Image (cartoon, rainbow, N blue to C red):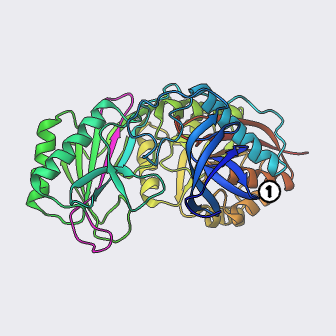
Amino acid sequence: MKRGDLFVTQVVGMSPQGEGIAYVEGRAVLLPQAVPGDKVEARLKGKYRGFLLAVPEQFLETALSRQQAPCGHFGRCGGCRWQDLEYADQLRFKEGMVRSALEKRGVSAGEFLPVLASPKPFFYRNKMEFSFGTDPAGTLLLGLHLRGRFDRVFSVEECHLQSALSNRILGAVRHHAERAGLPAYNLKTHQGSLRFLVIRQSARREETLVDLVVAQYPNAAVDALVAGVLEEVPQITTFVLTLHRGKAQVAAGQAHWVVKGRGWIEEECGGLEFAISPRSFFQTNPLQAARLYAMACRMGGDLQGLSVLDLYCGTGSLSLHLARTARAVLGVEIVAEAVEDARRNAARNHIANCEFAAGPAEEVLPRLQREGRGFDRVFADPPRAGLHRKVLEALGILRTPQVVYISCNPLSLAEDLAGLQAMGYRVAAVQPVDMFPQTPHCEVLSHLVLRE
């Protein structure tokens, strides 16, 4: 087969990224927007992540009914991939993806609980990060990346994952950037001013933070842009300017100016208060996050009088929930800024039995072992790549009676659970939690118990 070929095939599986998988002439083909059971006529586009990639041109048979996606950007945007699927079908596929990942690695769960649906399938995100760009005609763009293209941006008119106020802010920033004549930052020439726009909102405190990341400041045109946006959208609680002169495409920087407000917003989650600054980590679905943390605490059992270790603790969201019943909690986090946020959050909530250590978990955990520190429970919420090899080895030596593992990647979760099983743990329960409706991503809670 070559690029441009048209073929008919039956979709038989689904990738971890949510694309349908078919086999043509013995080779695996990814088919966006197709699901197992569909029969499609598709055209080959090329290769992607080691697979052939094809685009369905016609659905000859469908395994389930489709709905009209409410977002006009659906199909172009690299974010939502499942808006044309009924929410109940999305949940069923996510549960199946978790089960499949565990089965392939030989992980046996004593209890596999049904996936927990999100309270809000749309407009649930409390943070969105948008990129500036330029089209071939030189028009300023502000929005998200085209699916599969990290070098191409399209202007978002309305996103169905963020609030109506956030959509207003997005439009206002684009309008006033055009009026000010500010160019987007160019990745090849490293010229231009505008790089990123980050919008954060609290779900329960009606506060909004805007962080504009620029490559040049002080800059009178940037000041004019900010003034215009604040006049048009006075509901913005705090506005921050971030200067980022580096070449890396990340919404961070070397200097910050608070133009309006305190520089952070407040959120309430599970009865606790949290300060959220532009780069603080906080779950993007706060209503579901409260249920996730409550479930993790229940999995850990009665913590009265127990010592708890929380690995990859971020800004301390879970640590502080655990500290309300545990004797003592130690949170470990590699990002020093997040550790400072965690300490401030502990003080804000008058929690004195929770301490935090800054450093990579793979270095801190072996050090704690050398110091003779022991723990009655371990909680871990690592990044998508999963547990570092040294952390996995250290857990095998530490032999904590119970471990609660939170993962955002079923594949790395299955790999780590298989490793922990080999070290003497059994997987007592697995609970998928849908933190990201309209996407294939799923959070998973796992409860492990050390065999006698």
Specify whether residue 371 is in view.
Answer: no
Q: In which quarter of the image is the C terminus?
A: top right
Residue 266 as seen in the image, left or right of residue 176: right
Q: Give the range drawn in magenta.
A: 185-207
Residue nearer the viewer, 300 or 172:
172
Q: Mark 1 points at which residue?
A: 419
Residue 164 as seen in the image, left or right of residue 401: left
Q: Is residue 328 magenta?
A: no
Residue at the outermost bottom position: 189
Residue at the outermost front position: 6
Residue nearer the viewer, 391 or 145:
145
Residue type of the residue flagged with mark 1: Gly
Residue nearer the viewer, 82 or 27:
27
Please say if 141 is above or below 65: below
Residue 90 in which image quadrant: top right
Percent coordinates x, y for residue 5 in the rendering? 59, 57
| Residue at (38% x, 27% y) in the render | 204
Residue 159 in which image quadrant: top left
